[in-house]
Structures are given as structure tokens and as C-alpha cells.
Amino acid sequence: MEQPSEKNDEDNLQKFSQKLNGYEMHELRMMYEYFRDDLIYIVQILNTHSFLAELKSRNVPNVETYESMKENLGASVFSAKLVQGVFEAGKEAVIGFLECLYSLQTSHPHHNLLAVLWEIQNVEINTLKEQIIVDEKGHPLDPEIKEIQDKHKQYLLDTTEFLVECKPPGTTLKRQDFPISERFVNLVVVSTAQLRHRTQHELIEIGEKHESYLCKTQGALERVSPKKLFRWCRQIKQVPNVIMVSGVPGIGKTTLMQKFVCDWVRGELYQRFSFVFFFKFRELNRLEEVSLEEMILHQYPYLNSQLENILKAPEQLLFIFDGLDESRHQLDFASRPPNTNTKQKQGLGEILVNLLRQSLLKGCSVLVTSRPAKLVSIDPHIFQLFCEIMGFFHEERKMYIEQFFVDDKKLAVQAFDHVRDNEALYTFCYIPSYCWIICTVLSMCFKSQETNCNQLFFPVTVTQLFVIFISNILTNHSQEIEREKAKKLLMAVGWLAEFGVMNRLIVFEEQNLRSLTVDTSLHLLTSFMVESKQPRYVNYSFLHLTLQEFMAALVHHVDYKPEKLQEALEKAKSSRDGHAEIFLRFLFGLTDGSTIALLKHSSLHQGSSKIFTFSGEASRNIFAWLRHHFSPLVKKTSKDAWERRETLNIFNYLFESRNIELVSEILGQNLKIDFSRFRLTPLDCTVLAYILKSCKEPESLDLEKCFLETECWERLSPGLHAVQTLRLNLNQLKDEDIHSIAKALAHPDCRIQNLSLTNNDLTSKCCSTLASAIYKNVSLMSLDLTFNNLTGPHFSDLIAALSSPTCSVKHLELCALKLTHDDSKCLVSLSNNKNLEYLNLSHNSITDAGSGHLKDLIEKSSSLKKFMVGANGFSEGVVKELQDLINARQGLIIEVWQSHAENTALPENVTSI
């Protein structure tokens, strides 16, 4: 009998289809074009096999041509071609395609898919038409306002058309200003339901989520392009007009806003806004009490004659405020009454609060950017939409590097290969500013003809990357500055950086520089810091926050002051929000002799009068601090998320130090590592692999429900062979991920005895890879593959390997693998494995047709002690026959029971999704 839910699904699909069939082709075409970017992304993230099968069932033409395309072209190109191909196939194909997406929403409830379907179902086509037209054409304006709008757009074009980049020291790159459309690479932006309390360094926290957010958290997050920021939002059932875009330093918030404004000026984005006002908090900081009109005119004085008329249509206005974290003004949403007067003077913080609360210019739109840390103190409910910039994924990283070396394609390929092969650096490339620093270092090496920099091509750690960066700066200033002046400046800049890290400052005033004797007249300073371009007020910041953290760590090593180092270490330890974690990693990284040696390449560091003399005492004190405070922590296996984060921090400190003796001393023997249900980045996995290889005989590694991406498994692979017990359950492991695990199993020094791969997405395709590794393995004693889909032609390859006389597997779980009687034929050969004592084949679909093979296996096996084969659809007669086999051999236990459609629950000892 048909279930009610299935009946409802069919009825809803029919209504959906009727609505689509009621559209004219030009209306369907317009809607399809409107959702094109969303559709391409949705196709990209769906399970390709399920999606193409659904398309084929709906008679969408040319489906066969797409089946091998994704593997050959890559996901994004494949998706674009399929979406375009469906569009060109006509009305029936488009409707079939959309019906297919509707059918898949239950099994693949990704937020982007649900959002598109909801909008198609609930927004009338005429409303959609009006929205598309106003976004393309804009509102009709009076001639006077149109004239001032043209002037305003020209001003904004002049200020946003080019992307300004610092000229890398020591390179022959000719340009510093690039057209933003040429250099801009799309950032991954996701919407999140609510603000979360930040408990660690922002860079680390976002990195944790980066590789798994979009692919693994179905329904919780939505990928947002600039074109979707101000579109109908199904969560709030309206178009949002108060939006927060958050992101770590260097992730591209300002660049994204600059591109947004530039696209608006060019008519490519949101012409529904007649005026866009773009403000940076850093430039607003010197304003005291002003009115909203005065604030606008302070930056756009040419609007004076028409501003009052412009503000009469607030729904046509967009205010962008960039860099809330740099604001000196407090946002107080509770203490003061709302202000509705655009001419009334008030503090800048009050103006923003009133705009956000919609008491000023009700109906206007406000877009704010900020670092995550600033948002802890702000009520998240004030924002209707909250987005986070996740930076670059693989394709965007490659594109950025290609565009950086746009004049030399060969060099671009060489640079990307270097970065891709370097685990730590490639991982940090999700941040655009890191991409710039990495490309800058590589360009220094590739372009310099005078310096032999072969050694510089391969920085292993992030500390080494920054050491190379500094080394090249010093080398290229060797003719311009005396050693003593350079030394004095670098010490002063280092203590300024340290002051900023300890006091959470990223913007420095002139008085900060004066108090620490930073000489702003020296050109060398511009290699580390940038000066604001405000004519009436000057402030400074480091090229990147992480450069500030590096300089803060460096100064403790080269200008060692015991009391200041101790104070910094204690401050960093007492901070549970993790703002000093990267600083600590650099402190440990600079204890490594090979890392320090990289500075010897700089001309300013050669000879008897060196700029830097590294203190061995500083390193000893840093190691002593780690032994005292953190040795006990790593010996315990805690489920507490904060303690796990602290443990991972310690692993990072050890990784940066490259000190294997210290690893052994701190971690000891028989280490149990449990990061189950904890987010790990690819960089974390690189660090974890180093730890596993460096510590003595680690006992176990538990990564259950970590949802690691393929890149993570690749990074982990070099260390996995070192553990005895490896739990990888509930990770949505794919067939391609098995290659990394197989490498560990095939390693000549593999120590893995217990391997659990339950509840993943493995299919028959991975069996050959796994089999090849098992043939080479001599340590594996227990293998659990429960809850995968291994039925198919390659399953026999796996069984052949497990049947080998050299196979040491004693305990084998093949439960709930969707095996049929066809798969059961090969199981007989398991009798050749003289070590096999336990076999679980429960909850498959072998049925009576395969029972004969199971009987043969039981009768031929001399080692089997327990055999579980329940819930396979056997008849009562077969169940009795199997139970009777217990009497055939003493000591053999057989558990077999019948399964029924209405009662297919697993036994308590079997893990279920």
C-alpha cells in the first residue's frame, strides 16, 4: 500500500509540474536564466549517478553524453555544460530537469536546492519579471537626480575599477594596479543561521569549516553569490535588507565589496539601488558627532544639491560599511531611543545602529562587513542574513595563481605545482592574502637571477614561508639602508606587532609608532606596513594580520627579554578565544635551526654585523613552557571540544618546531588520539600525519564523523600506517578516498591491526584498491565495512584478497553492504583464510538463492568460530538448515534470523546511521 508521504510527494510534484507547464517558453527561459548560477552549483554538488539516473527517467535528451563528462572536465565545467545543454534542448527538457531537482530534494536536501525550488513555487512569475527588470534597468529618475547619479557612478568607478596590490619586494613585476575584473577571483560565501561564539583564532576556525561546509552540511548552509545577497530569502520569507558579511583577515571582504560596487556602477548588478554609498570604517573613525547627511557629504560632497531628494526614496538606497572590526565607535542597540532625523547630529555608532534598526531611512538596505571576533558582542538578530566568506577552493586557488603570473603561463604552472605539492602552503591558499604572500615569495625566487634560491622553493611550514618573505625583503634593501638602521627599525616594528597582538590592535596611530621609536621615514617600513590614504589623519597596519603575528614572534627570538616572553606566553595561554594561537605557532617555528638558516640568504644578515642573532635561551624557555603547561593535556583522551582544540594547537606547535625529540618527549608512547566529531582542516591533517610519524608507536586514531574531504585524506595518508587502531566511521568516505587509506595499509611498516570504515559512501569500485593493499599488508586483524554499498563486480576482488593464505584478518564485518546471492558466490573462498574466526554477513539481501554458497563456506572453513547471517531474507527452511550446521562442527556459533519488511531493526551491537 502506498505510504501517505509518498502520495503527498506525488501530488506536490504534479502541482509543481502543472505550474511549469503553464509558463510560456519565454517565461521559462527568463526564469531558467535567473537561476542559472544556482542550477550550475546545485548540479555540481548533487550525486552525479543519482542525478543522471533521474534525468534519464524523465526522458531528458542526451543524458548518456554527460555520464563520463564530470570525470574528464571537472565538476564546474560539467555542471555548466549540462545546464546549458538542457536549456538548448527546449521546453520539455527544462521542465524535466526542474522536475528532477524537485524529486531529489528529499534525498539531497541541500539549502541551495531547497531555496531555488521554494522560490519557483512561491514567487509568481510576474513578480519575478518585475524584479529582473528593475535589477537590469533601475528605477526611472528625475533628470536632475539622473545627472547626479551619473556623476556618483563615475566617482565610484574611479575608486573601485582597479585593484591595488603592494609591489612585491625583489620582483620584476611591472604592474601594481590591476583592473578588478581581470584579477578578481570569486570567493566562496555561505549563509549561516546564526552567530556562534568564537572560541579560537579566527583563521583557524574558518579553516576548520572550510573544506567541509559546503559539501557536507546538507540543508544548513547556502552558497551565496553577490547576485543572491538581496534576493528573496525563504528563511525570513522576504528580501533581506540588513546583511552582515563576515570573514577572517585577508579573506577578501574589502575586495568583494569593491567588486560589488564596481559591478553596480557598470550596470551589472542590482540597478534597483539608485545610489550606493560605500564607506570604510577606518576612514570614518575621525568623525565625531555628525548627522547622516553630513556623513554622506563628508565622502561625497558633490551630492549636496540633491541629497535631500535622494534620501526621499530610501528603498532605492544601499549603504555599505566595510570593516566594522576597525571601528572605534560603539554599537549600542539598547540604551538610546531611535532617531529618525537625517539632519540630527549623533555619534557614528548611533547612525549605524539606527540604519540597522531601520529607524533611520526605513526601507533602505545596509551591508556591513566585519571580522568574526567583533561580532561576539553584537546581537545577531539585528541582521536578516548573515554570511561568511570561506575564501578559495581548489579551482579558485589555481585561478588566482594563474592570474598573478598572467604574463608568463609557464611560470604560472610551475608556481601552482610548487604550491600544490606543499601541504601547508596549499591549504592556507584559501585566504587570498596568503595567496598573495605565497605568490610573492615564489616570484622572488623565480625572477631573481642573482640569488641562488633553490632552497627557497620548498618552505615546509608557514613559519618558513614568512622567514623567506622577510629574508627577501632584507636582501632587496641591502643597498638602500645601513645595517644598524635596519636592525633598529625591525626591532621597533617587531615590538609594535607584539603590542598589537597582546592588545588586539590591528590599526596603529602615529603615537603608537612614536612610542616604540618606529622610523616612518625609512622605505623599508613599507615592506611590512601600509599607511592609510586619508589626507587629514594617518594610521598604519601590517600588510596582513599574520605578518603582524610573525613579526611579534620574531622579536622575542632576536631581542630576547625573559620577562616579556614569559608575559606573552602566559597571556596567550590564558586567552580562551585563541587570538594568539598563530603567534604561538610562529614562536615555536622560529626555534627550528633549518628555518632560521633561511635568513642567511639575505645580504643584510651576512658577515660579522648581522641584523638578527637568535637567542638559544628564548627557544629553551619556550620548550620549558610547553612541557610544564601542556604535557599532561595530550596524555588524556577527552571529549571536550576546547581540550581537543588545545591538543591540536600543541600538535601545531610541534609541527612548526620540526623537533622530533620534543615530539617524543611531550607525547610519549602509546598515544591515543581522538578527534571524533571534530572539524579538521587539510592543514590539521598534515600536522596530524607528522605527529603520527614522529611519536613512538601511537595506539589509536579515532576520526569518526569528522567529514573529511579527499584532500584531508591525502594529507593524512603518510602517517596513518603508524597507528594500531584506526576508526573512520561516519565520514561519507568516497571511493577515491580509499586510495589514501590503501597507501597506509600497503606501507611496509604498517602497524594497523584494527580498521573500521562503517557508515560511509563506499561502493564496489573501491574494492580493487582495498584488495591490492590487503595483499601487501601483514598487520590487519580486524576489518569492519558495515553500512556501505559494496555489491557489484569488484566485490570479488576484495574477497579474493581476504581469502589469501597470507591474510591475517581474524574479524570481518560485512554487514549491511547490500550484498545479493550473486555476491555470495565468491564468499566460499574465505575458507582459505586460516586466520578468519568471526564473519558477519547480516542485513544483506543474499536470500535462499545464495544460501548454498554460505553452507559451503561454513563446511570448508576450519578456523571460523562465529558466523552471523541474520536478516538476509531467508525462508524458514534455510534458517533451520543453517542452524543445523552448528552440530556439524564443535565450537562454531551461527546466528541467523529471519527479516520482515515491518521489522528490520539491526541488533544492538550493529552500528546504524
Image (cartoon, grey):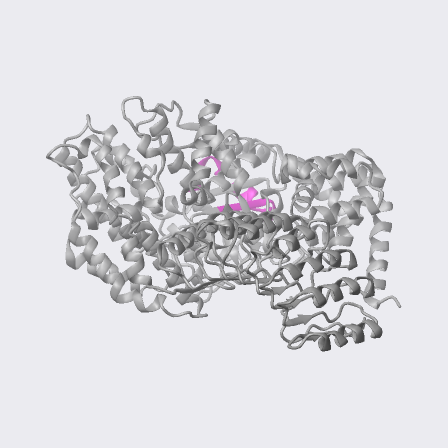
**Which residue is the extreme one toward the left?**
608
Q: State left or right for residue 52 relative to residue 501.
A: right
Quarter in which the C terminus is drawn: bottom right
Question: In this view of the protein, which residue sits in the foreground, 373 or 571?
Answer: 571
Q: Residue at x 30, y 42 (%)?
A: 540
- 614 sits left or right of 843 in the view: left
- The x and y percentages for residue 678 are 49, 62
Residue 211 in sight: no
- In which quadrant is the N terminus drawn? bottom right
In the displayed structure image, the side of residue 471 where residue 635 appears, left or right: right
Residue 302 on the magenta segment: yes
Q: Is residue 545 above or below residue 108?
A: above
Residue at left 20%, top 34%?
521
Q: Quadrant of residue 889?
A: bottom right
Q: Examine the rendered structure and indicate whether residue 416 appears above or below residue 873.
A: above
Q: Nearer the viewer, residue 543 or 799?
A: 799
Residue 7, image x, y percentages: 85, 63
Q: Nearer the viewer, residue 674 or 98?
A: 674
Residue 584 percent across, percent down from the top left? 30, 54
What residue is shown at x 80% (from left), y 36% (from top)? 62
Tally of marks = 0
Q: Position of residue 682 (x, y in %)?
A: 47, 50
Magenta highlight range: 297-320
